[in-house]
């Protein structure tokens, strides 16, 4: 069943509530590493207990298989892309990660202040995860109305699709690859776009070709329920 992202739209106004970063209090259990069959690597994060993740559309592409590695080192399949926004290149994908291993992140849709401390987790190596630290340098808006958060945290290419955390461990954005011409600056999509994408997929049907390749044949049947809604049922058979 689909579940809404954990969202916190409020923000403390007292700066004393901000805790200095340390590996002990920094929340990265909900961060995953992604590797596709074609060799593309990146990051993502859980947004609900169902195991759905958010990442960059440059990492997960239709027609490519992928695995996600969670914080305990276990790997699981990416099942399908359930939502994609071509404007901001974000995707939501379902995974086969069991719910007991899923730790959704806390999302804060309030825009950060210039100068606010931020952190971008990178790829996990063993029991440790690399983290890039920095601060918010600017807020910009595209011609399509998308708000970008520019930060000085110099994340590695493997952090494409990773969450942008504030000092409270809340996700305030999604990391993109370094913007051209922006030396020392990374551009992140504001967290409100995550909620917009998730709301959009709940009010529309899944695009059939968004499924990741599988060794199983999947037939889809539809019927009209007593409430008048069209329902879809998947039936899997071995090829």
Image (cartoon, rainbow, N blue to C red):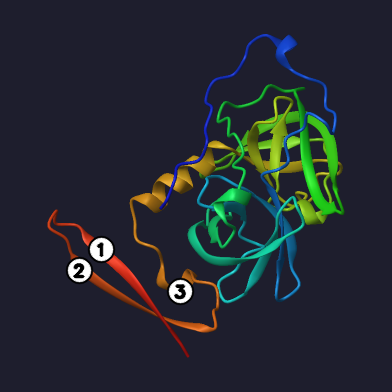
**In the drawing, does residue 115 fall left or right of residue 202?**
right
Residue 203 x, y percent position in the rendering: 33, 51
| Residue lying furthest front | 100
Placement of 11 over or under 128, stated as above or below? above
**In the drawing, does residue 117 fall left or right of residue 214?**
right
In front of the other: 141 or 56: 56
- SS assignment at label 1: strand
How much space separates mark 1 and mark 3, taking CA atoms? 18 Å
> To which residue does mark 3 refer?
209
Q: Which numbered disc flags the more N-terminal residue, 1 or 3?
A: 3
Mark whose residue sits in front, 1 or 3: 1
**In the drawing, does residue 28 fall left or right of residue 9?**
right
> To which residue does mark 1 refer?
231
> To which residue does mark 2 refer?
223
Q: Are marks 1 and 2 in contact (CB under 8 Å)?
A: yes
Residue 135 x, y percent position in the rendering: 79, 29
């Amino acid at each position: 069943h689909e579940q809404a992202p954990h969202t916190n739209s409020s923000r403390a106004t007292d700066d004393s509530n901000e805790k200095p970063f340390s590996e002990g209090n920094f929340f990265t259990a909900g961060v995953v590493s992604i590797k596709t069959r074609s060799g593309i690597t990146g990051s993502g994060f859980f947004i609900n207990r169902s195991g759905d993740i958010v990442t960059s559309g440059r990492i997960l592409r239709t027609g490519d298989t992928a695995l996600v590695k969670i914080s305990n080192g276990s790997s699981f399949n990416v099942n399908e892309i359930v939502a994609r926004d071509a404007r901001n290149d974000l995707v939501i994908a379902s995974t086969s990660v069991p719910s007991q291993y899923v730790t959704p992140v806390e999302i804060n849709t309030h825009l950060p202040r210039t100068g606010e401390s931020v952190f971008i987790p990178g790829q996990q190596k063993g029991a440790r995860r690399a983290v890039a630290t920095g601060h918010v340098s600017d807020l910009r808006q595209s011609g399509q109305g998308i708000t970008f958060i520019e930060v000085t945290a110099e994340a590695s290419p493997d952090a494409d699709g990773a969450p942008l955390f504030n000092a409270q461990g809340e996700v305030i954005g999604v990391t993109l690859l370094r913007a051209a011409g922006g030396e020392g600056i990374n551009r992140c999509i504001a967290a409100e776009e995550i909620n917009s994408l998730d709301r959009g997929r709940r009010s529309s049907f899944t695009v059939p070709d968004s499924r990741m390749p599988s060794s199983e044949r999947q037939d889809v049947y539809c019927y009209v329920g007593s409430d008048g809604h069209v329902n879809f049922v998947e039936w899997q058979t071995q090829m």
